[in-house]
Amino acid sequence: MASHSDTLVVFFGATAGENGGKLGSDEREIILLVWQIVDLHEKKVGKLHKCFVKPDTLELTDQCKEETGLTVDDIVKAEPLDKVLQQFQQSVSSEVKCLGRTTYTLCVDSPLVIRQALHPEASKKNLVLPECFFSFVDVRKEFHKCCPNAGPAQKLTLTSMLEYVGLPAVSEESIGVREVRNMVQLTLCILAEPHNHKFSCVETVNYKFDSGTCSKTEPVDSETVIRARGLPWQSSDQDIARFFKGLNIAKGGVALCLNAQGRRNGEALVRFINSEHRDLALERHKHHMGSRYIEVYKATGEEFLKIAGGTSNEVAQFLSKENQVIIRMRGLPFTATPQEVLAFLGPESPVTDGTEGLLFVKYPDGRPTGDAFVLFSCEEYAQNALKKHKQILGKRYIELFRSTAAEVQQVLNRYMSTPLISTLPPSPIVPVPVLTTPPFLPAASSTRDCVRLRGLPYTAGIEDILEFMGEHTVDIKPHGVHMVLNQQGRPSGDAFIQMKSPDKAFMVAQKCHKKTMKDRYVEVFQCSTEEMSIVLMGGTLNRSGLSPPPCKLPCLSPPTAYAAFPTPPAILSEAALYQPPLLAAPRPPQTTTHSPAHTLAYYPPQPHLYMNMNMNYTAYYPSPPVSPSTVGYFAAPPAVAAAVAAQPHHAAAAASPVLPQPGALVRMQGLPYNTGVKDILSFFQGYQVSTWNCEMKACFNSQEMWSQILEKLFVLCLDVSDVYMNFSCSQAFKITPLIVTG
């Protein structure tokens, strides 16, 4: 029997547009329902019922009028769909009871009337369908099971099935009545001898969509996946499931697609339980969700896994609780705690299991992204939470919107799979010479024997860091504390520390992570010397993790600032841009004839002269890790070298145009045009700078236009700390340290 039912209700429906094999493909409303009961035990039939349905739009297509013979006058006085469904339920229940039966199952000729017409229309009109409309038997599939030689179920028709069993088809009746009578006599035929068929292939319609997770190793059939395009950005997985109401979506089978910024791009990948439902979903191409039409295309299983697949244990544990409503929070302060988020949501929207129902999204190095996902046990709590949309937490407004399990996976995959050091493709046009690491930088290594401190108070010094490290201070390498300043010379809140071994670095990261320094908790992460060097050479710390310094990136145009290195022939020569005395040409290594104490090496200028990048970090060394060598230094400005040679105590250095140690060379850009040496010396009052330390230079653009003068000043400072701790803080003009020694 049909799932142990006593009776079958042979059911037929027609719409105001397409009917037959295209039923429901044009979103037209139902205008006709016809049904008749068949007693499976006694092989008896009940009364045939025919009801017109009044649609919201009183309009019939020409094709509908031709096929059905109906006019607007036939339906204008009919009851709406909800009233007709009530009549149906009352009539069937009463008749089944009169037959002495208790249960019944719908029997249809193809599932289109249930899946493509009735359920979608009821969903749009917010109607609650009776339970009987969530299960049915398809007479074509039952006949194919009974008579497999009749042909594939998809190609069977009522006429062909009746011909196969030798029964005449009813053709004189009106639409609906004709189809129901043919289905009834076909049903009675296969119930009787010699077939004695039992209706057992009951199909179901899901009551609701079940969210869940999908593993990257799970096989996904490409014949079950579609791509929906044009979705409202605020739509959730439940909204998409409602759009496909009547079709069964696999558990966790809705994956909202995100753009590069982590925001929804109006697309989603949907996975159905089988290819039949996928094919029916394709028939909903350009159906409407609200006022927007949605495009539906085929997709592949690989595309679905790329979006929805995940292997994170943290996400799997977070999503292990079923029947939860997921809300995404965006724009959280980076210092927000779980308790602050719970207080923000308030008692009217309690989070499932308290802090266990919160999932903060973080970068691979542990920094928060400002996103979080929250679980609620019911729709009411979620609605209360959504009322907090754009309310203030701390000093930031918070965005709240519905989310999905697949989106949780996708967001976590996107952030956690970001490489710590992003790589960029090499330039296909111009080969760029690799700039070697300055001698005072630690040798790059992938050994994770360093730690990074993030979130330091801006007033914190080296002493504060050593106190913060506590007993682990003894494990720091000599000269191994490196503060990081921003382009304005101010503390960035970051520092790198070289430890004696990876084990020591691991212990520091474990024990000092989120310890407090001056009322602020400091995050401590283990990293490698290579990663540290990337930042100290001018690399960036941005939302994608660590990026190489500009000197490691392709440069397709000549630098517009002070050129420290020769460029390939494909790039314009510096001589075409600047006068020769300005350019510091590199010299080959040579053996000095004077004491190293009187040698000043000119190292490459900071890489940020080549390219503007966000959040460039400049290294500040309290004490350089190693002593600079004499390899790869650059010539001093001629006038400064001549002044040095003229000094009596510098006679030994006269043969080589280099400056005495210790000291540092800085360049000032953006000076007023009427600035003189005395003005510069007045600016540097209090530091060890004398008149012979200053050299004014006028630089011209490539057209050598006097109106485009760029003035630069070279100053030799006798105190290196003056350069980094004071000069670089100026906001009036740009000061660039060119050399560090000592």
Image (tube, helix red, strand yellow):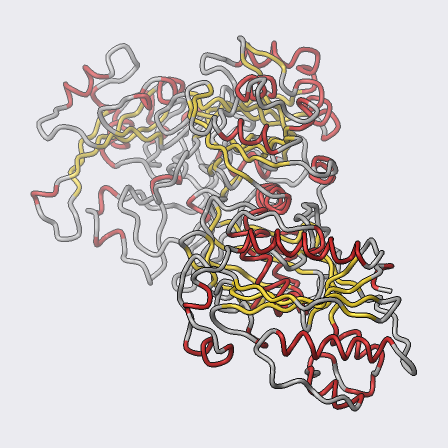
Q: Position of residue 245 (x, y in %)?
A: 60, 55
**Pick the front one: 527 or 480:** 527
Task: Please state which of residues 600 and 348 is positioned toward the viewer in this rendering.
Answer: 348
- The vertical placement of 365 against 38, above or below, is above
Q: Residue at x 51, y 52 (%)?
A: 124
**Residue 687 image offset from top left, x and y in percent:** 30, 13
Can the viewer see residue 418 in this picture?
A: no
Residue drawn at the location 41% of the way across and 34% of the way down: 615
Quadrant containing the N terminus is: bottom right
Point out residue 230 in the picture as x, y percentages from the top left corner.
45, 57
Q: Quadrant of residue 397?
A: top left
State whether residue 625 is above or below residue 158: above
The residue at 51%/50% (across/down) is 125
Q: Return the residue nearer the eye: 453 or 653.
A: 453
- Of 408 and 693, the residue lying toward us: 408
Vertical order, 129 against 273 (above or below): above
Q: Tally the marks.
A: 0
Q: Does any portion of residue 490 appear in the rendered image? A: yes
Q: Is residue 282 left or right of residue 251?
A: left
What x and y, as percent, mark residue 619? Answer: 46, 29
Write the residue at 71% across / 68% down: 10
